Amino acid sequence: MNTIVNVTHFIIVGISNVPGLKLPIFLLALLIYLLTLSGNMIIALLVCLDCHLHTPMYFFLANLSILDMSSSTITLYRILIGFVSGSTMVSYGDCVLQMYVWASLIGLELLILSAMSYDRYVAICKPLQYHMIMSFRLCGLLASICWVSAFLQSLPHTIVVIGFSCFESIKINHFFCDILPLKYITCSDTTLLDYLILSSVLFHLFFSFPLTFTPYIFIIATILRIPSTIGRRKAFHTCSSHLTVVILLYVVLLCQYLKPGQKNNLDSSKLFSLFNTAAVPMLNPFIYSLKNRDVKMALRRGLKLFQSR
């Protein structure tokens, strides 16, 4: 196969090559993006403007909302722009930047979820000490560590990709610039990149994963000791949504980045990416917040204030 050097742009293949599916895919992507943007923006604004939501739990939820809006924008916009403009071409620099930001946001989400687990552990297992332990200074420090470490962790992968000198094709079999489709079309040595991807997966598997799930061992033990059935149900309801999404996210990421033979089966990888880029950011506001009593009350207060003006 002929190799291509000095690549200046790539062509994004998209979710499907079937012409008749382009309009339905565009409309679905637009609907998902608008729902994601509106739902997460509502949560972020409510947390910022309503003093009743100035608590550690909603502080981390606001961070998650900003993260979800960013991840949807950085990935789904390529589908939307490609349909409107009729061009699926993306410059080399924009492609690498998109890959870097997306990889950083995935790592950031796992770290933020770990911080949220710790917050729930303190709230349920140490309720009398909650406000003393989960001070705003600690919350700000945890959030800062998550954001900085996530973007630093993805930097080595990006530097390696920038160093790729040739490619077998300029067509990326994906709907955005992800690291695996880029790796599979390069003719440069990918050994170092493979080690970096594996190290990132192992980091989250043996660091973020235990930090996220270990608190739930203590949380479940505490819930089982609650004498009241209503109290147990209320405590479990507080954590069940978070735990469900975390499990699904880890399973999908492991299937996506550790599944063998992906070079010949990138179409299945698109489905896993769709779950991370579309389903999770769209559902998070409903799972975590919009069905929450405090958020509903804050939304009513905001609507009343808006109508009074």
Image (spheres, helix red, strand yellow):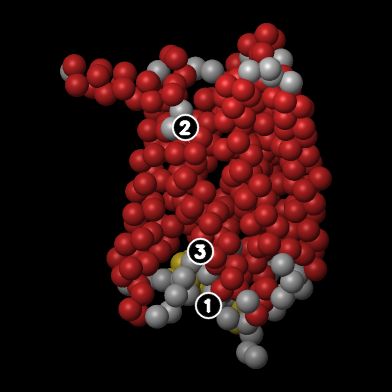
Residue 247 relative to residue 46: left or right = right
Q: Residue at x 53, y 57 (%)?
A: 275
Q: Position of residue 135 (x, y in %)?
A: 64, 14
Residue 265 visible: yes
Give the labeled residue for mark 1. Answer: 171
Residue 247 relative to residue 195: left or right = left
Q: Residue at x 67, y 31 (%)?
A: 117
Of circles 3 and 2, the one toward us is: 2
Compare marks 1 and 3 and give the one earlier in the sequence. 1
Q: CA distance from mark 1 to mark 2?
A: 40 Å
Q: Amino acid at mark 1?
A: Lys
Q: Position of residue 167 (x, y in %)?
A: 63, 78
Q: Position of residue 269 (x, y in %)?
A: 60, 67
Indicate whether 166 appears above or below 156: below
Q: CA distance from mark 1 to mark 3?
A: 11 Å
Q: Bin the neighbour count of mark 2 within 10 Å (Cα to Cα): few under 14, some 14-19, many 20 and up.
A: many
Residue 217 relative to residue 298: left or right = right
Q: Residue at x 51, y 60 (%)?
A: 274
Give the labeled residue for mark 3. Answer: 176
Compare marks 1 and 2 and give the one earlier in the sequence. 1
The image quadrant of residue 138 is top right
Q: Residue at x 61, y 43 (%)?
A: 244
Q: Amino acid at mark 3?
A: Phe
- Name the disc covering residue 289, or none: 2
Compare marks 3 and 2 and give the one earlier in the sequence. 3
**Of helix, strand and loop, which one carries label 3?**
loop
